[in-house]
Each structure stands twice: as C-alpha cells, then as structure tokens.
Image: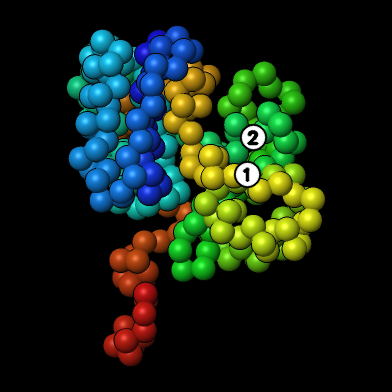
Amino acid sequence: MVVLALDTSQPVGSVALARDGVLLGVERFNEPASHLVELGRATARLLNAAELGAADVTRIAVVIGPGSFTGLRIGLAYAKGLHAACGADVVTLDSLRLLALPLLADHESVCAMIDARRGEVYAAAFARDVASSTAVAARELLGPCALAPQHLLAALATPPACFVGTGAIAAADAIHARLPNATVAGIEHAYPSTAFLALHAAALTALDAGAVRELEPLYVRPSGAERMRLKPVDARRDGESP
C-alpha cells in the first residue's frame, strides 16, 4: 500500500508518503497563502524522490479539520481530484484526533487544542483505547468544540494528563495554573503529524465513492461569512464586527 497523507488545515501544511508501513518522506510548507500552490509541488517532490507516480498511490489520507477554512477546502479538493484521477482509496481523520493520537502512547488521556483566533481554541479530549491494538483508536472524552481556553478547562470533567497543539502552547500558563501536574507538549507536536497518519492510514476505513464526492470539512464553528449571513440585519447596519 502506498499512502499519501495531506494536511492543509494549519498554517504549516504537510504531506507525507509511506509504503507498506515505511515512511518515505515528509514535506512541509509554512505559509497558508501558499497551500494552493505548494500542496501539489510538495506531493510531486515526494513522489519523484520515491520514484513513484500519482498512479502508484493506493490510499489518500486527508485531514478534514477543524482549522483554516480555506486550507481545508484546498486539501479536500486536491484529495478528491487525485481520487478521481487515479482511483486511490480515501480515508479521513480530524486534526484534533491526529494531534492527540501520537501522545496517547505515553499518556492515558490527551486534550488537543488548536488556536482558533478570536480568543478561542478548537479542542477535543481523548483517552487511550486499551481494548484496541491499532494506533488510530481512541475514546472521545470531549467532542470537537470551539471555546475560550478558560471555558474549555472548566468543561473538562476529567483533567487530561497532557495538552497538545498551538492552542495548548498559547494557553500553557492557564493550563498549569489550573492543572499543575499536566504536561503541555512542545512545539515539535504543535501540528498534526502527516507522518503518523501515513504510517497508520491502513487501519482506517476507506470511504465509498459517494462519500468521497460528498466529503465536507469539519468546521466546528461557522465561518465569518456565515456568521454575517446569520446576523440580524439591524446588527449589521449598526456596524457590529463579525
């Protein structure tokens, strides 16, 4: 199995390539505005270095969010196009779960936090699934949500052993003030790992053709444009900010 893993949900985009459980390479691109161009270029570099072509890809693993609204649309459109062109299977994983999974090997529970701006984080919490032998299995303790960090910490019924992601790094002081024994993972774990996704994508269930066509990003909260569409007319006339 040749797996191409894609993540354009974050400011740092990433592509990884693996064959039969062996990682062949990872490419990253750091500017969100470049995701549209760099995703294809990074994929081509990885395939060329491995002496493979797009037709050799048998599984596409794509991160569906939450994260950058524009970035998510770019990644899903690319995955759908590649699926249509080469017939590769498509599997998905959300960015919060992908942040947490690598750390569940060393921690019983992990809270993933992504900086969502406007004083909020996208967050979800997971516990190690001891009943499963796959690295992509985890029990959801708190479903994906968008909250201010202090509200998130208050909403966690059971304090996680570890916090990870850009939102956790930014809120490290607040986390430690409330949970002095909690671990906040470092910058090396700040973004979802496409390397991990590529290595473990074989354990995920492939979508059928109809599900691939209908696949949509996991946004968690409305976009700015959607919030304006839903805002009362009087509020918009009064110049209320989105």
The answer to whether residue 123 of the structure is visible from this angle is no
Amino acid on which disc 2 is placed: Leu
> Which scheme is used to colour this image of the protein?
rainbow
Q: Which mark is residue 167?
A: none
Q: Determine whether label 2 and label 1 are within 8 Å by CB.
A: yes
The answer to whether residue 226 of the structure is visible from this angle is yes
Which x, y percent locates residue 123?
57, 52
Which residue in the structure is indicated by mark 2?
A: 103
Lateral position of residue 129 relative to residue 92, left or right: right
Q: Which residue appears at 66% of the width and 48% of the height?
A: 184
Q: Residue furthest front?
A: 187
Looking at the image, which is closer to me, 235 or 53? 53
Which x, y percent locates residue 96?
54, 43
Q: Which residue appears at 73% of the width and 23% of the height?
A: 131
Looking at the image, which is closer to me, 1 or 103? 103
- Mark before the other along the chain sequence, 2 or 1: 2
Quarter of the figure that contains the C terminus: bottom left
Quarter of the figure that contains the N terminus: top left
Q: Which residue appears at 58% of the width and 66% of the height?
A: 148
Which x, y percent locates residue 33?
25, 51
Q: Could you say which quadrant of the image residue 8 lies in? A: top left
